[in-house]
Amino acid sequence: MESKIIGYRGIANSEKVIISGHAFEKHKVRDVEPHHGRRRNIKQTIHRFRARPLKWTAVDIRLQGIEQRVRTNNKGFFTIEIKHKLSRPGWYPYELFWKRNNKQFKSEFYVSDEHETGVISDIDDTLLVSHSTRLIRKLALVLFRNAHTRKTIPYIKNWHAHIRDLNDTAHPRDFFYVSNSEWNLYDFLVDFFSINELPKGVFFLQQLKKGIRELIVNGNIDNNHKMNSIQFLLGFYPNKKFILVGDNGQRDMEIYSEIVSRYKDRIKGVMIRKLPYIKNERKIHRFQQSVLRSNVPFKSLR
């Protein structure tokens, strides 16, 4: 049995860092390799969704010479705010450890330039081919493929080009990925983004699922997760403008429409990927017109 702490990529403004993660009593997920086949991939997926969280345990965090202790909740999750004096934007390391054993676990956090444009993007079917509205295909991808064999969306170069256009031809450095994927898939997403050279960023994912059954029935889905995460980012960076990126497969347009109506002066542009198997052109057109009426630029990507 292998106990483990996973610290997620943290987020920081000019005053404080927010660090979160999970502590596990058992976590058997191993590093992925290009040659891993279906049997190994299925085994990895089972391990991800059968990882056993460690409840009510103390985790120590060391960050820029500062040590603080936090306690996990009844789901093994922890989060903590730590003040800092870092002034230069970029990635910085932090460490996690506990009295349970002598191991130290490393992660990192991102200090953002609070006046530079940020990108808030969905992941599934916006960057990663997921078939999130087609249950059987979605499950086949999760079970049988890994970070090396999963695919980015077609024409990924156009995705980058459109974002540069919405940011006055400059490529943003600050990326925040808000997804309905669960924390069980964090290691997979980190590997996938690295392998495919996608912009490095901070992930905002759904709470852990327990077992394959919850994966199949979409248990523990928080329908307000995306809206709450975006509003958090707008509040955490009050001087920052954002580009919103999503697709027409689920609720992205509905959520982004509300965000634009509330915060149109903070939204620099909106981009929606049109999925080839979703026929809702009228809905996209209405959404586009409402965005443009707010004087927010709009782009679509197939």
Image: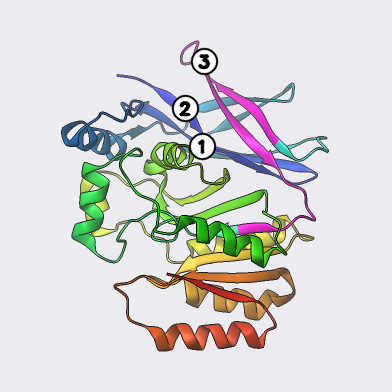
Asked whether the residues under the numbered discs 1 and 3 touch, taking CB atoms below 8 Å apart as contact, a structural biologist would say no
Disc 1 marks which amino acid? Gly
Residue 277 point in image, percent of width and height: 29, 73
Circle 3 Cα neighbour tier, 10 Å, few/some/many (<14 / 14–19 / ≥20)? few
| Left or right, 27 with reference to 143 | right
Q: How many badges with numbers are in the image?
A: 3
**Magenta region includes residue 97:** yes
**Magenta region includes residue 288:** no
> Does 175 sit above or below residue 239?
above
Disc 2 marks which amino acid? Ile
Label of residue 42 in the image:
none
Mark 1, secondary structure of its residue: strand
Residue 96 point in image, percent of width and height: 57, 24
Q: Specify the segment rendered in magenta.
A: 91-119
Q: Residue at x 53, y 53 (%)?
A: 177
Q: Residue at x 65, y 44 (%)?
A: 11
Label of residue 21 in the image:
1
Disc 3 marks which amino acid? Lys
Residue position marked by numbered label 3 in the rendering: 99
Q: Which residue is situated farthest in the left direction here?
A: 39
Q: Residue at x 20, y 50 (%)?
A: 140
- First in sequence, mark 3 or 2: give its number: 2
Picture quadrant of residue 50: top left
Mark 2, secondary structure of its residue: strand
Q: How is the image coloured?
A: rainbow
Residue position marked by numbered label 2 in the rendering: 5
Asked whether the residues under the numbered discs 2 and 1 touch, taking CB atoms below 8 Å apart as contact, a structural biologist would say yes
| Left or right, 187 with reference to 70 | left
Picture quadrant of residue 2: top left
